[in-house]
Image (cartoon, rainbow, N blue to C red):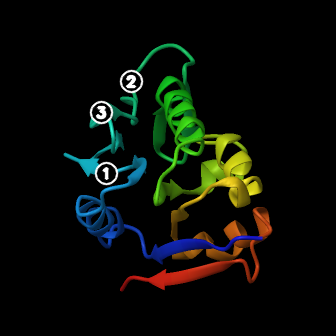
Amino acid sequence: MKKISIITGPIRTGKTTRLMHWASTQKSIEGLFQPVIDEKRFIYHTSSRTLKMLEVPKNSDGDNFIEIGNYRFSREVFNWGQSVLLNAIKKDLDWLVIDEIGPLELEGSGLEPAISEILKDRDSFKGEILCVVRDSIMERFLEHYKLHSKFQLFVLP
Protein backbone atom coordinates (compact mmCIF):
# COMPACT_ATOMS: atom_id res chain seq x y z
CA MET A 1 0.00 0.00 0.00
CA LYS A 2 1.23 3.50 -0.86
CA LYS A 3 2.85 5.47 1.96
CA ILE A 4 1.59 8.87 3.03
CA SER A 5 3.69 11.83 4.13
CA ILE A 6 3.12 13.29 7.57
CA ILE A 7 4.26 16.62 8.95
CA THR A 8 4.24 16.70 12.72
CA GLY A 9 5.31 18.97 15.55
CA PRO A 10 3.94 20.65 18.66
CA ILE A 11 0.83 22.84 18.62
CA ARG A 12 1.32 26.41 17.37
CA THR A 13 4.84 25.95 16.03
CA GLY A 14 4.19 27.05 12.45
CA LYS A 15 3.35 23.75 10.73
CA THR A 16 0.44 25.25 8.76
CA THR A 17 2.29 28.47 7.94
CA ARG A 18 5.33 26.63 6.59
CA LEU A 19 3.19 24.19 4.67
CA MET A 20 1.11 26.96 3.09
CA HIS A 21 4.29 28.71 1.99
CA TRP A 22 5.60 25.47 0.43
CA ALA A 23 2.23 24.76 -1.23
CA SER A 24 2.23 28.19 -2.86
CA THR A 25 5.29 27.09 -4.87
CA GLN A 26 3.64 23.90 -6.18
CA LYS A 27 1.70 23.66 -9.44
CA SER A 28 -0.41 20.53 -9.06
CA ILE A 29 -1.68 20.66 -5.50
CA GLU A 30 -5.00 20.81 -3.75
CA GLY A 31 -6.18 20.50 -0.23
CA LEU A 32 -7.24 22.15 2.97
CA PHE A 33 -5.29 24.18 5.48
CA GLN A 34 -6.49 25.25 8.93
CA PRO A 35 -4.76 28.53 9.67
CA VAL A 36 -5.36 30.51 12.84
CA ILE A 37 -6.15 34.15 12.03
CA ASP A 38 -6.77 36.63 14.85
CA GLU A 39 -6.99 33.71 17.30
CA LYS A 40 -9.78 31.99 15.29
CA ARG A 41 -9.40 28.80 13.25
CA PHE A 42 -10.36 28.84 9.56
CA ILE A 43 -10.34 26.35 6.70
CA TYR A 44 -8.64 27.46 3.50
CA HIS A 45 -9.12 25.59 0.21
CA THR A 46 -6.05 25.94 -2.00
CA SER A 47 -7.46 25.78 -5.53
CA SER A 48 -10.56 27.94 -5.03
CA ARG A 49 -8.77 30.21 -2.53
CA THR A 50 -11.84 30.02 -0.33
CA LEU A 51 -11.43 30.89 3.34
CA LYS A 52 -14.21 29.85 5.72
CA MET A 53 -14.40 30.47 9.45
CA LEU A 54 -14.36 27.10 11.17
CA GLU A 55 -14.46 28.27 14.75
CA VAL A 56 -17.90 29.26 16.01
CA PRO A 57 -18.25 31.92 18.73
CA LYS A 58 -18.85 30.38 22.16
CA ASN A 59 -22.11 32.29 22.61
CA SER A 60 -23.63 30.90 19.38
CA ASP A 61 -27.13 29.50 19.49
CA GLY A 62 -28.26 26.32 17.78
CA ASP A 63 -26.64 22.95 17.46
CA ASN A 64 -24.86 23.18 14.12
CA PHE A 65 -21.48 22.98 15.79
CA ILE A 66 -19.12 20.42 17.29
CA GLU A 67 -17.63 21.09 20.71
CA ILE A 68 -14.24 19.87 21.84
CA GLY A 69 -12.53 21.30 24.89
CA ASN A 70 -12.98 25.08 24.85
CA TYR A 71 -13.71 25.18 21.13
CA ARG A 72 -16.80 25.09 18.93
CA PHE A 73 -16.47 24.28 15.24
CA SER A 74 -19.00 24.61 12.44
CA ARG A 75 -20.48 21.31 11.19
CA GLU A 76 -21.37 23.05 7.92
CA VAL A 77 -17.77 24.11 7.27
CA PHE A 78 -16.47 20.64 8.14
CA ASN A 79 -19.02 19.12 5.73
CA TRP A 80 -17.83 21.50 3.02
CA GLY A 81 -14.23 20.50 3.78
CA GLN A 82 -15.08 16.81 3.46
CA SER A 83 -16.65 17.45 0.07
CA VAL A 84 -13.57 19.40 -1.08
CA LEU A 85 -11.26 16.54 -0.07
CA LEU A 86 -13.39 13.82 -1.66
CA ASN A 87 -13.53 15.77 -4.93
CA ALA A 88 -9.79 16.45 -4.86
CA ILE A 89 -8.86 12.77 -4.51
CA LYS A 90 -10.50 12.14 -7.91
CA LYS A 91 -8.25 14.66 -9.66
CA ASP A 92 -4.92 14.17 -11.39
CA LEU A 93 -2.73 15.98 -8.83
CA ASP A 94 0.82 15.71 -7.54
CA TRP A 95 -0.21 16.53 -3.96
CA LEU A 96 -3.27 16.40 -1.73
CA VAL A 97 -2.83 18.23 1.59
CA ILE A 98 -4.94 17.54 4.68
CA ASP A 99 -4.23 20.03 7.48
CA GLU A 100 -4.90 19.13 10.23
CA ILE A 101 -6.00 15.72 11.41
CA GLY A 102 -6.72 16.09 15.10
CA PRO A 103 -8.68 14.69 18.04
CA LEU A 104 -12.04 15.32 16.35
CA GLU A 105 -11.11 13.12 13.40
CA LEU A 106 -9.84 10.39 15.72
CA GLU A 107 -13.29 10.45 17.33
CA GLY A 108 -15.01 10.11 13.93
CA SER A 109 -16.00 13.76 13.58
CA GLY A 110 -14.59 16.88 11.91
CA LEU A 111 -13.24 15.90 8.47
CA GLU A 112 -14.37 12.30 8.96
CA PRO A 113 -15.41 10.06 7.23
CA ALA A 114 -13.68 11.69 4.24
CA ILE A 115 -10.17 11.15 5.63
CA SER A 116 -10.78 7.45 6.21
CA GLU A 117 -12.07 7.05 2.64
CA ILE A 118 -9.06 8.89 1.21
CA LEU A 119 -6.51 6.92 3.21
CA LYS A 120 -8.22 3.60 2.48
CA ASP A 121 -8.26 4.27 -1.30
CA ARG A 122 -4.89 6.04 -1.49
CA ASP A 123 -3.45 3.56 -3.98
CA SER A 124 -5.90 4.82 -6.62
CA PHE A 125 -4.62 8.40 -6.22
CA LYS A 126 -1.73 9.23 -8.56
CA GLY A 127 -0.13 11.85 -6.33
CA GLU A 128 1.17 12.07 -2.81
CA ILE A 129 -1.02 12.57 0.25
CA LEU A 130 0.42 14.92 2.88
CA CYS A 131 -1.20 15.07 6.32
CA VAL A 132 -0.50 17.38 9.25
CA VAL A 133 -0.76 15.75 12.68
CA ARG A 134 0.33 17.30 15.97
CA ASP A 135 3.02 15.32 17.74
CA SER A 136 0.96 14.73 20.89
CA ILE A 137 -1.53 12.51 19.03
CA MET A 138 0.81 10.91 16.49
CA GLU A 139 0.68 7.39 17.95
CA ARG A 140 -3.13 7.52 18.22
CA PHE A 141 -3.29 8.76 14.60
CA LEU A 142 -1.09 5.92 13.30
CA GLU A 143 -3.08 3.32 15.23
CA HIS A 144 -6.48 4.77 14.30
CA TYR A 145 -5.73 4.75 10.56
CA LYS A 146 -3.58 1.59 10.74
CA LEU A 147 -0.59 3.33 9.17
CA HIS A 148 2.33 1.79 11.08
CA SER A 149 5.26 1.56 8.61
CA LYS A 150 3.10 3.03 5.82
CA PHE A 151 4.26 6.62 6.16
CA GLN A 152 7.21 8.95 5.91
CA LEU A 153 7.58 11.48 8.68
CA PHE A 154 8.74 15.09 8.66
CA VAL A 155 9.18 16.51 12.16
CA LEU A 156 9.16 20.27 12.59
CA PRO A 157 10.73 21.79 15.71
Residue at the disc numbered 2? 59
Asked if residue 51 lies left or right of residue 94, the reply is left
Q: Amino acid at mark 1?
A: Pro
Asked if the residue at tag 2 contacts the one at tag 3, i.e. Cβ–Cβ closer than 8 Å, the answer is no
Quadrant housing residue 144: bottom right
Which quadrant does the C terminus fall into?
bottom left
Residue 107 visible in the displayed image:
no
Q: Outermost residue toward the top?
A: 62
Residue 131 position within the rendered picture, expressed as x and y whole percent measured from the top left: 53, 63
Q: Which label was assigned to residue 61?
A: none
Query: Mark 1 falls on what kind of element?
Result: loop
Badge 1: residue crowd in 10 Å (few <14, some 14–19, many ≥20)? many
Query: Are the residues flagged by discs 1 and 3 in contact, CB closer than 8 Å?
Result: no
* Residue at (39% x, 36% y) in the render: 55
Whole-percent x and y of residue 90?
59, 41
* Residue 133 x %, y %: 53, 67
Mark 2 or 1: in front is: 1
| CA gap, disc 2 and disc 1 | 22 Å
What is the spatial separation of the Cα atoms under label 3 and label 2, in whole angstroms?
Answer: 25 Å
Residue 20 drawn above or below residue 69: below
In this view, the residue in front, 106 or 43, is 43
Can residue 85 be seen? yes
